[in-house]
Amino acid sequence: MLPRWVLWCCVVLLARPAHPQGAQQCPAPNAIAPCTCSVKKNGLDILCEFTEQQHIQKAMNTLRSKPMIIFYLKLRHNNLAKLPSYIFLGLDIRHLTVHNSTLAVIEDSSLSSIGNKLTQLDVSQNRLATIPTSSFTHLNHLLILNMNHNKVTAVHNKAFLGLDTLEILTLYENKISVVDGEAFKGLEKKLKRLNLGGNELTAVPQKALALLENLKKLEMQENRITSISEGDFAGLRSLDSLGLAHNQLREVPAQVFSHLNFLNSLELEGNLIQRIDEKAFVGLEENLQYLRLGDNRLHEIPSEALRPLHRLRHLDLRSNNITYISEDAFTGYGDSITFLNLQKNMVHQLPTMGFDNLNSLETLNLQNNKLQHIPEEIMEPILDTLRVVDIMDNPLICDCDLAWYEAWLSGLRDRDDEMMQKKRTVCTMVNEHREYSVAKMPLEKMNCKRKPGYGPSSASNTCPILVINFIVLATRGL
């Protein structure tokens, strides 16, 4: 027989109701129409779309008649030019979205009644022209504030005062050209991520940013910043990621990032950069791993500036004006690089020993350059570690120098790769005036010796994947 205590537990479990006491229940559909309701794990999910303020107000009146947790309240695509005072009075709302609803005014008391519980507020894609500071003051549990795609032109002093718990603030795609010196006063302790991208800034708002000593990620892409200088990022001692892509920078001066000792990722692509000072990356030696310099106007690899970056893993130099790679281009820092992108440049010839230091390289993109020959002695130091190589869209000549490619490729055929069938790397047989797939050159006819197999699969049990059209492997983050 079973012990009595086991029988007793079974009786208790069977006697429990199917739903716990106080379980959330949606109101009758017609009571909140045209809004809809569904029950989620943590509370109700209320959605009001394509309707008017009076219908939303009616639904709120119905919802407040019975205590319940509204985990999501989504007001989307409505005609709601103003968020009136106390519209949410008596409601327990945790996540509030007012999206694409012509919202231009948030009255001072419209959010005050839900300030103790609200953790996320999304007022994106509306018509807000200023930061509604007095409306935000009581949101003392807010973690995320999204004001993307509005019409804010300036961030005034103490604009977010009272939001002591805020961790993420995103102001992407407004019209901000002015950020006052104390704009982020009150956010010093908790703010981890700030997005000022897609605005009209012409300079780094140094004084305002200097307060944010705990900030981890700063995004200022797609502005009109024309220059950066030493001291612009002083105070951001915890910063891990900095985005300055798609601005109008022409150079990277000495020691401009010297205060960012913990920076892991730096995005500078899509500028007008022609010059990088030899001391541009001073201070980043110990932690920088991701550096994006694509879509600029560099004429050479900025090797002297890069040499101290002995932890660099990802180097993107695509779409520049690089015509020449020196023998020592990667000396001093190449050993840690796993990803190198040189596509869409104008490189005519690879240096004989240029890749000798790239001992960890897994992905190499040379697509769309001016290369006619890629000899084995140049590639041989990296063939055993390479998992992805792209040499498409080069004017390659079919010769014995390319025989390594077939041998290397043979080590990558353990897995079916659809992209290999769709995209071919080709070369031209000059005397025949015809193209061949580099992987299927008539080596016997060319009097070339077949090479022994290369590739990671010959050195280990891993199954690497070649993606001719250059995509980053899903099986291993780079």
Image: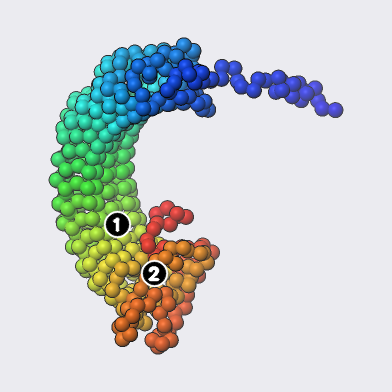
Vertical side of 300 occupied by 12: above or below: above
Quadrant of image for the N terminus: top right
Q: Nearer the viewer, mark 1 or mark 2?
A: 2
Quadrant of image for the C terminus: bottom left
Residue drawn where x is 24% and y is 24% of the image: 104
Considering depth in this image, is 331 or 290 the residue closer to the camera? Answer: 290
Considering depth in this image, is 203 or 303 the residue closer to the camera? Answer: 203
Q: Name the residue under label 2.
A: 424
Q: Is mark 1 on a helix, strand or loop?
A: strand
Residue 124 image-quadrant placement: top left
The number of callouts visible is 2
Vertical side of 208 occupied by 272: above or below: below
User: Disc 1 or 2, which lies upstream in sequence?
Assistant: 1
Q: Name the residue under label 1.
A: 316
Three-letter amino acid code at disc 1?
Answer: Asp
Vertical side of 110 occupied by 472: above or below: below
Vertical side of 118 occupied by 151: above or below: below
Residue 182 image-quadrant placement: top left
